[in-house]
């Protein structure tokens, strides 16, 4: 099992590259961990080795025994986490159970114990919950899968969660967004270790973006809100959801609700955690995205969603999603363009 950086002259020369310092990278795994959280970043690092890097990959579990992965296969490990010596990089995988129930105490304690012996810590997807449970994200910025960012923020208020980031680095601790974003983070680590030229070679070989355009918000699902408890607020929410193209303002919605604009704003803040104006914008963004996903034109989607003009919608998309409507449509629309000319479905 690798226990720290060392020079591997013979192996480097065998590959026809200059000898480099070997960097030990250990993946911390556990039952039902997401397989791609390990294999994706591992493939990036292994591919970097073919271009002259020298990553020695290892795998460790708390028990030192093989683990069951999310796809049902068994993943053998090299050692128990407690048996690790000095390592360059520790990578903590994610898994669906990490957000369904408390992080296992023994897993959090094992990662906390190995942290001082690692040059840098990395989590992939919901692996950030393990780092947070171990206290390793306190006072730091971090990210996780877009679906679970708010949960991470609520469960660990000392962590500054960046919901849209594909990955975040804060003082030697790296966290990534969901699943495939772990490959983006691994490529960034390669660039940090070996420079942009080698990282670019890896990106081209694996058919990856060197810099993936936009943040992870563009991948998020439509707005998911708990039904408001207040019947007054529920009526307003239902109206905006049903008719996002209407001229909704805080004042007009307050009239519908029969309350003052100030009281409506308080209701939104108390129950939904956002302002009425932000809710309207979020709803319009979701409607526009669903229309673009289905193949509608940018102009048709802007009108049906209530943005008034394609330019207004473009500004909001860029500000919120990091991509223009045209870019979003190219990435996420159906494979067969439906060719709809308007929101009414006329071809």
Image: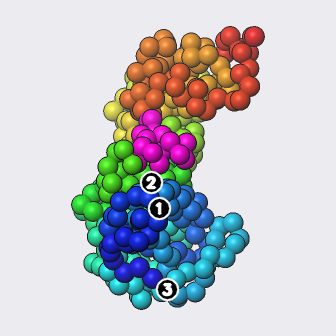
Image position of 32 (left or right of 116): right
In the rendered image, which quarter is residue 74 located in?
bottom right
Look at 48% across and 86% down and name the residue there. Answer: 80
Of the image marks 1 and 3, the number of the one nearer the N terminus: 1
| Vertical order, 53 against 89 (above or below) | above
Image position of 229 (left or right of 318): right
Is-magenta flag for residue 68?
no
Of the image marks 3 and 2, the number of the one nearer the N terminus: 2
Q: Which mark, residue 51? A: 2
> Depth check: 182 or 222 in front?
182
Measuring from the top left, give residue 307's x and y in whole percent. 49, 17
- Secondary structure beneath dot 3 equals strand
Name the residue carrying label 1: 15
Measuring from the top left, give residue 6's x and y in whole percent. 32, 75
- Secondary structure beneath dot 1 equals loop
* Count of marks placed on residues: 3
Of the image marks 2 and 1, the number of the one nearer the N terminus: 1
Q: Marks 3 and 2: CB-CB under 8 Å?
A: no
Graded by Cα atoms within 10 Å as few (under 14), some (14 to 19) or many (20 or more), the crowding at tag 2 reads some
Look at 35% across and 51% down and name the residue there. Answer: 191
Name the residue carrying label 3: 79
Look at 34% across and 45% down and name the residue there. Answer: 196
Graded by Cα atoms within 10 Å as few (under 14), some (14 to 19) or many (20 or more), the crowding at tag 1 reads few
| Vertical order, 327 against 160 (above or below) | above
Look at 24% across and 60% down and name the residue there. Answer: 171
Q: Marks 2 and 1: CB-CB under 8 Å?
A: no
């Amino acid at each position: 099992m690798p226990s720290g950086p060392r020079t591997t002259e013979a192996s480097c020369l065998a590959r026809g590259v200059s000898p480099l310092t070997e960097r030990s990278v250990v993946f911390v795994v556990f039952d039902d961990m997401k397989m791609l959280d390990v294999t994706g970043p591992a493939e990036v690092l292994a591919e970097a080795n073919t271009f002259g890097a020298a990553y020695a990959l290892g795998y460790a579990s708390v028990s030192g025994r093989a683990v069951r992965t999310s796809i049902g296969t068994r993943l053998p490990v090299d050692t128990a986490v407690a048996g690790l010596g000095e390592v360059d990089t520790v990578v903590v995988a994610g898994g669906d159970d990490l957000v369904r129930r408390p992080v296992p105490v023994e897993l959090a304690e094992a990662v906390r114990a190995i942290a001082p012996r690692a040059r840098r810590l990395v989590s992939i997807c919901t692996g950030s919950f393990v780092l947070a449970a171990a206290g390793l994200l306190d006072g730091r910025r971090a990210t996780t899968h877009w679906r679970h960012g708010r949960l991470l923020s609520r469960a660990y208020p000392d962590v500054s969660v960046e919901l849209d980031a594909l990955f975040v680095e804060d003082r030697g601790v790296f966290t990534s967004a969901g699943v495939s974003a772990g490959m983006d983070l691994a490529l960034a680590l390669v660039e940090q270790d070996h420079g942009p030229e080698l990282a670019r070679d890896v990106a081209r070989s694996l058919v990856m973006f060197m810099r993936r355009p936009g943040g992870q918000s563009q991948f998020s699902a439509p707005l998911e809100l708990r039904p408001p408890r207040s019947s007054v607020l529920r009526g307003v929410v239902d109206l905006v959801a049903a008719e996002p193209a209407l001229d909704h303002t805080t004042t007009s919605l307050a009239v519908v609700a029969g309350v003052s604009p100030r009281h409506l704003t308080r209701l939104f803040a108390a129950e939904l955690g956002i302002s009425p104006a932000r809710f309207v914008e979020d709803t319009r963004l979701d409607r526009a995205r669903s229309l673009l996903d289905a193949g509608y034109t940018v102009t048709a989607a802007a009108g049906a969603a209530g943005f008034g003009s394609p330019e207004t919608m473009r500004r909001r998309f860029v500000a919120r999603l990091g991509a223009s409507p045209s870019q979003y449509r190219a990435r996420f629309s159906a494979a067969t363009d439906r060719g709809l000319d308007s929101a009414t479905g006329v071809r």
